[in-house]
Image (spheres, coloured by chain):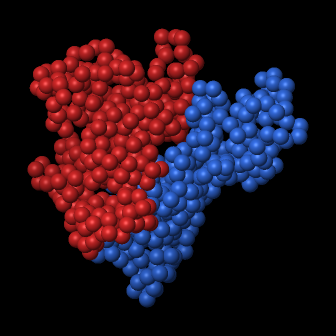
Chain colours: A red, B blue
Amino acid sequence: MLKFVLRRLTFSIPVLIGILLVTFILARAIPGDPCLAVLGERATEEICETFFRRNGLDQPLPAQLLIYMRNFLGGDLGDSLRFHRPVMELLVDRLPTTVELGFFALLFAISVGVPVGVLSAYRHKSALDVGTMIGANIGVSMPVFWLGLMLAYLFAVLLKDTPFALPPSGRLTPGANPEPFYLVAGWYAEGEEPLGILRFFSRIHTLNAVLTLNGELLIDALRHLILPAVAVGTIPLAIIARMSRSSVLEVLNQDYVRTARAKGLREHVVVGKHALKNAMLPVITVIGLNFGLVISGAVLTETIFSLTGVGRTLVDSITSRDYTLVQGFTVVIAAGFVIINMVVDILYGYLDPRIRFN
Amino acid sequence: MENSEPASLAPSENYRSANLWLEALRNLRHSPSALIGSAVIGALVIIAVFAPAFATHDPIQTMIGVPGETGRLPSKPPCIPLLGCEEPQHILGLDLNARDLYSRVIFGTRTSLSVGVITISLSILVGTALGISAGYMGGRVDNVIMRLMDVVLAFPALLLAISIVTILGPGLTNALLGITITFIPQYARLSRASVLSIKEQEFIIAEQALGASPLRIVLAHILPNAITPIIVQGTLGVGTAILDAAALSFLGLGAQPPTPEWGQILSESRNYLFTSPHLVFFPGFAIMITVLGFNLLGDGMRDALDPRLNRS
């Protein structure tokens, strides 16, 4: 197993270097003078020279690449041109929103998609099965941003005066100011600067609410999460349901399932214990592949639901030509994507020994 | 036995491949999803080609001060005669710039269909060329091309497209280019895999022994054998490409106003969702129907062309 993990790790390293290389080249391919872009049109030649020297831009390209990689490994992504703050700091501020949204979107997709897929395979060609397949086909064809807008209209306008009404924007009710768990626990005094990682976790509102045992905050945060999470999770849900269905169908037709039935095992043991275990393997891969969809979905839905996450910040930065931010965020998201895929592969190898030994 | 009659190999291959296509067509005719998908796409193609005939107004003309117009405020709600509306001038109402929404959605079909088809054709062309070169040449060429494809695949597709458009500048052509790049690796991988499985087969080795040029081998033997999965993947890809293009336009990076493009129409009116939901509903619905059409056809084709799933 260790050998497999190491092999998979070494396979990811060239891809990660490739990502750094591609973003480096993309950033250098941006037309226009970086000095004028950062310091404004009025920057003189002398000021620009100092700027170039300070940022290592007077060096030859390979040397620049080395500086860039060294900075990246040290967690330095440069300063945002628009916010005049380190990109890393912005990431710690805004990534929690996206992580929370992505987590709940996937949770929704898996918790609905897998049971629906398994059931419709078990009741192959029933009304439920046909309905699932039609629903899944429609689900994968819907633009995320359109679904988000339609959900917002349905739950915030049409169902406004019913108990089903849900807030169409923001992460918490305006005015809510939850106390971070590290302050509640007394680890830091008010006004002290906490560790970045603690600040990161405290900004995941649902987690913070659980850690501070604040039920009201938890419900408020969850109510705000439902619409965006459903919007982001619908395409993955449809894909997961389809995959679970076809995977279970295939397994149910295999000899060992027939043997299990023939030896008189109860149906729920045959399906639940024997069939599901093997059928879930391809589903795990599909779940891994869906992280990309979740990230794309987050970019689109955060704008709609006024969530200040990574996606919305990225989109806004494009229009204001904040290249350092776009570059930094893109690298981190892509690297995260590679690492998640690696973890999924390793998990897959752990669950299915055939993968490990091939 | 096989070596004693090399001349008979080619005709039997042809015979089998013709049979395969005929059988696929027969299977397609029995697949409800392929039938519905083709009907939807067929209808959309007709709408796109004859858009001026279907549209009631100029899609970019504002109706302010136009003779015969009632002069009401923009973003008029839809007026559907079937539902008892007496003023059937603008079937889906007017948008915020007082343009006829129905005509804009109709003309949007042209943009979306062409973006989908052009993107996928380009990426199939480039991807297949890269994949076949990698698979056929092997060694270092293979390594360089496929590692590059791994890197492109490492980015979430929409994010990479956004980065590319950021550099090239917003616009439909650049969006198209950005999306094309994100699709290339799929086709490179598919065609490479097919080449690898074919190139060691005896009929290829026989061709090489007879002195056929690599180009001839690739065009006459490898490509026809590798094309089936690419066609299936391509049909499914058109839907995704249309969704991506609409998303880029929605973010303001794709089609620019006043071009009638579905994502762009949605983007223009999304802030008026609570007062004029119809402006958001119809273009989004059009995207969904189009993507659904390609997905259904793609699914049907996969079932029809995959011999392993063949109903006996």
Give the residue drawn at x 30%, y 59%.
A19
Front one among A261 and B116: B116
Left or right: where A63 falls relative to B130 = left
* Residue A275: quadrant of the picture: top left
Give the residue drawn at x 52%, y 51%.
B253
Image location of residue B40, percent across then percent down: 66, 44
Front one among A249 and B266: B266
Judged from this view, the residue extending furthest toward the bottom is B211
Left or right: where B169 falls relative to B32 = left
* Residue B161: quadrant of the picture: bottom left
Left or right: where B312 falls relative to A25 = right
Give the residue drawn at x 81%, y 24%.
B85
Is residue B157 in view from this perspective? no
Number of labelled discs?
Answer: 0
Quadrant housing the C terminus of chain A: bottom left
Image location of residue A195, percent across then percent down: 16, 36
Image location of residue A248, percent across then percent down: 36, 35
Front one among A124 and A3: A3
Image location of residue A228, percent across then percent down: 43, 30
* Residue A20: quadrant of the picture: bottom left
Is residue B309 in view from this perspective? yes
Front one among B196 and B149: B149
